[in-house]
Amino acid sequence: MNSKMRFLAVPFLFIFFLLPSAESVTYNVQSYGAKSDGRSDSTKSFLSAWAAACASVEPATIYVPGGRYLVGGASFSGQNCKNNAITIRIDGTLVAPSDYNVLGHTGNWLTFERTNGLSIYGGTLDGQGTGLWACKNSGKNCPTGATSLGFYNSNKVLVSGLSSLNSQNFHIILDGCQNTRLEGVKISAPENSPNTDGIHVQSSSGVAITNSHIGTGDDCISLGPGSSNIWIENINCGPGHGISIGSLGSNLQEPGVKNVTVKTVTLSGTQNGLRIKTWAMPSNGFVTGVLFQHAVMVNVQNPIIIDQNYCPNRAKCPGQASGVRISDVTYQDVHGTSATEVAVNFDCSKKYPCSRIILEDVNLSYKDRPATASCVNAGGSSSGLAVPKACL
Ligand SMILES: *[C@@H]1O[C@H](CO)[C@@H](O)[C@H](O)[C@H]1NC(C)=O
Ligand SMILES: *[C@@H]1O[C@H](CO)[C@@H](O)[C@H](O)[C@H]1NC(C)=O
């Protein structure tokens, strides 16, 4: 069938939606010299394709065909872009340099800064973190490693159907972003890979993370200071350290976390389930307006936990209390199995006790028996099913 016939065969509505995209300009990275052999450094080609898309006043698509592309550290800036509708469609895999010393001290592998209206569809990022994890796990002095994909100070970012494998450090960071959506993302690194957090959000508002599978060596999702209006739905997490608000409160002056919804999540074999974690140090930070709803725990070590006495190397905070005020946190319909006896653990600040913590329809068991709960400086109430019996 020739293309004209196919065109006639599509219903009118589809033609209607296809026409505008037919007008967008496409920049194929191979036209800029990128090689899909996994060995030739294609960094400059990707940057050139970005510069061209950026300079276009029409909606622009950067296309990455199938194959493996070696890309070193690259920063894509939207600062002087004429374009507020850039799409990056990736069929291939971007591969980081395997020698971790190349990016180890740079902070990031791929970054987008000051973009406005950026969509990324598909693609795989291979961070090649194995060497760095081995270094870190051997207790040697190693570089921090690079975050695979960072979005900074950007507005209207959409990431759909992206896979991130084996990051050196974090997989994805959103920092200073508004109106951002990550959907259908797959993140994977082994359980023993240090600091490979899945998605970390901070200083950002209006972020949705949905329909994603995250298995990694650290938090699946973590929300840092200044996260607000966050929607997290339909997430599978495990292995990993769970879904975490924090760590917060390591600074005296710190923006708070507010209006967070985490719903329909499954945590399997993770260290934590739904966690809020703050340093035991003075701070003006806060957490308020959090709803955890419809969570299933499968053999999770700490299914529900608030830890305000976080102080990994005790030197920094002996005898101190966390200044972070935690209020209005609801856990609704949380059930499944705990890998430890204490499945609900609220260890709040002695200076600023947690307030209005609500448990509704919670049923967590440990070894086929009801699990137990522990509360320190935690106020609130419980309704509906309460296994373990709430201690609020
Ligand atoms: C809370 O966040 C959601 C998005 O997650 C948003 O739709 C809603 O308007 C926010 N509520 C307030 C009071 O800002
Ligand atoms: C709580 O969960 C356990 C095991 O998951 C189940 O056997 C028990 O019936 C549940 N309790 C209630 C009251 O629903």
Image: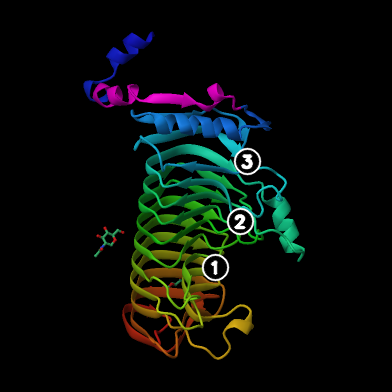
Q: Which mark is residue 147?
A: none
Read off the residue under disc 1: 299
Label 2 vs label 1: CA separation?
26 Å
Asked whether, in this view, residue 365 is left or right of residue 193, the answer is left
- Residue type at tag 3: Gly
Residue 199 rendering spot, x and y as whole percentages: 49, 56
* Closer mark to the observer between disc 1 and disc 3: 3
Front residue of this view, candidates 83 and 227: 83
Label 2: few (<14), some or many (≥20) within 10 Å? Answer: many
The secondary structure type at the circle numbered 2 is loop
Asked if 59 appears above or below 349 in the picture, the reply is: above
* Closer mark to the observer between disc 3 and disc 2: 3
Residue 388 rendering spot, x and y as whole percentages: 43, 81
Q: Earlier in the sequence, mark 3 or mark 2?
A: 3
Label 3: few (<14), some or many (≥20) within 10 Å? Answer: some
Residue 219 rendering spot, x and y as whole percentages: 53, 63
For the C terminus, the image quarter is bottom left
Read off the residue under disc 2: 169
Read off the residue under disc 3: 72
Do callouts 1 and 3 mark residues in contact (Cβ within 8 Å)? Answer: no
Label 1 vs label 3: CA separation?
39 Å
- Residue type at tag 2: Asn
The magenta-colored residue range is 15-34
Asked if 121 appears above or below 287 in the picture, the reply is: above
Do callouts 3 and 2 mark residues in contact (Cβ within 8 Å)? Answer: no
Residue located farthest toward the front when viewing the structure as drawn: 80
Residue 250 rendering spot, x and y as whole percentages: 50, 75
The secondary structure type at the circle numbered 3 is loop
Q: Earlier in the sequence, mark 1 or mark 3?
A: 3
* Closer mark to the observer between disc 2 and disc 1: 2
Asked if 133 appears above or below 335 in the picture, the reply is: above
Asked whether, in this view, residue 264 is left or right of residue 50, the answer is left
